[in-house]
Amino acid sequence: MNNLDPNQDFNQELQQIQKVEEEEKAINTSSILIVDDTLYNIQLLSLMLIRQGYVVEQATNGQEALEKATQLLPDIILLDIRMPDIDGYEVCKILKANPTTQGIPIIFISSIEEPSEKVEAFSVGGVDYISKPFQLIEVLARIETHLRLCSLQKKLQEQNEQLQLSASVLARSLKQERELSEMKTNFISVVSHEFRTPLTTIQSAAELLEHYEWTKEEQTEQLHQIQSEVKHMTELMEDVLFLSRTNANKAKLNVTEFDLLKFCKQLIRQIQRTFGKNYNLHSSFHHSVNDISIDNPHLQQDIPQFTVQMDEKLLRQILSNLITNAIKYSPENKDIDFQMIIDQENAIFIISDHGIGIPEEDLTHLFSAFHRGKNVGILPGTGLGLSIVKNCVDIHNGLISVKSQLNIGTEFRVTLPIDNHLTT
């Protein structure tokens, strides 16, 4: 059975004919620069080419030819060799040395029949050579041939650039696919490890409670251990789900109005209680507009009220992750500095420590999920914290940067837009 569609074949042929006609039209409306010091030759060639639909420009000497070629960028140049000021060879050399005009095809027209002259014409960059007295039909045929060749070269170049672009896109896609595959592998490894440890603890505690007699105090201690491990697993699952939502662009900015100073005061106190007195957590607030400066606002009772419109949940994720990271990767009794700077448009949070620092080679992937620095050793962590921070900053249309030196310390700077007013 013949499945060929006659209408489809006809349409394809029609499209091909239309394409050829468009190319013919484009060629016939091309611009041509004629360069000759003999006025009769210019007039004769111009009349013939204009009748064929070409746009014609004229130059009677080399200097004029250079100026018009640079300004007009014709599609092709017909160039005489013998001219009084600058000969055709020199004009051709100058045009070919200029990146703007080097792609214009040049056809030499001359009465010189010496083979050496023809060789010279091609060596300086000419694409063809027509002898005088010329035949009009021959000139037309050669012009159309080189215009077609030039058009094909441009199309080939465009296709080559498109292929290179496609290859680049494909390479990036393959790289992203590899990174995604590695991330999935890391996810399975990290999450399974992070869940296995607390599950083992829960199972052990439950078995002990089942098979041994415990005092009320001992039972309470085991139950607290189970609760602690369940809380850890819940927090881990929440982190994974949060990253999943943000990566799928499902997390949205939920702006509410709240007192930023009070929020920071409570957060810092909470973190201070959790980690006890093993770290020196210092904080300060600066308002650049009203020139207000407060050191340790979490210890102040009468502090200004600073109302902002931000996403409180995202801000808590950002600050709590950065502050707890600073504590986690710093030796005990080291200073942790939290600084907040307010201007008319932004809140800038600077969290700095004097801890182990981050290796330079890890900075590139610092905010990737499950990535951890090579120098963290046995310190606990999932590698999700900074990825969550980066996603929260992005959702808030903010910026985050980091500076770090090994064994000296790390500074994170977060800039978030605010809509605020200050009252005392």
Image (cartoon, rainbow, N blue to C red):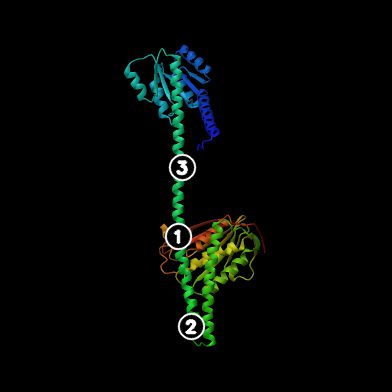
What is the x, y in percent for residue 304? 64, 65
Sequence-first tag of 2 and 1: 2
Residue flagged by tag 3: what amino acid is it? Leu
The secondary element bearing badge 1 is classed as strand
What is the x, y in percent for residue 170? 45, 47
| Residue 119 position (above or below residue 305) | above
Q: Nearer the viewer, mark 2 or mark 3?
A: 2
Q: Residue at x 34, y 18 (%)?
A: 117
What is the x, y in percent for residue 338? 53, 65
Quadrant hosting residue 309: bottom right
In-image side of 132 versus 294 (left or right): left
What's the distance in space between the residues labelled 2 and 3, CA to CA?
64 Å
Compare residues 72 and 77 and report the one nearer the observer: 77
Q: Which residue is mark 2?
A: 208
Mark 1 neighbour class, 10 Å CA radius: few under 14, some 14 to 19, many 20 or more? many
Q: Which residue is mark 1?
A: 404
Q: Nearer the viewer, mark 3 or mark 1?
A: 3
Q: Which residue is mark 3?
A: 165
| Residue 280 position (above or below residue 62) | below
What is the x, y in percent for residue 339? 55, 63
Q: Residue at x 34, y 22 (%)?
A: 120
What's the distance in space between the residues labelled 3 and 1, CA to CA?
36 Å
Q: Quadrant of the C terminus?
A: bottom right
Sequence-first tag of 2 and 3: 3
Q: Nearer the viewer, mark 2 or mark 1?
A: 2
Sequence-first tag of 3 and 1: 3
Residue flagged by tag 1: what amino acid is it? Ser
What's the distance in space between the residues labelled 2 and 1, CA to CA?
46 Å
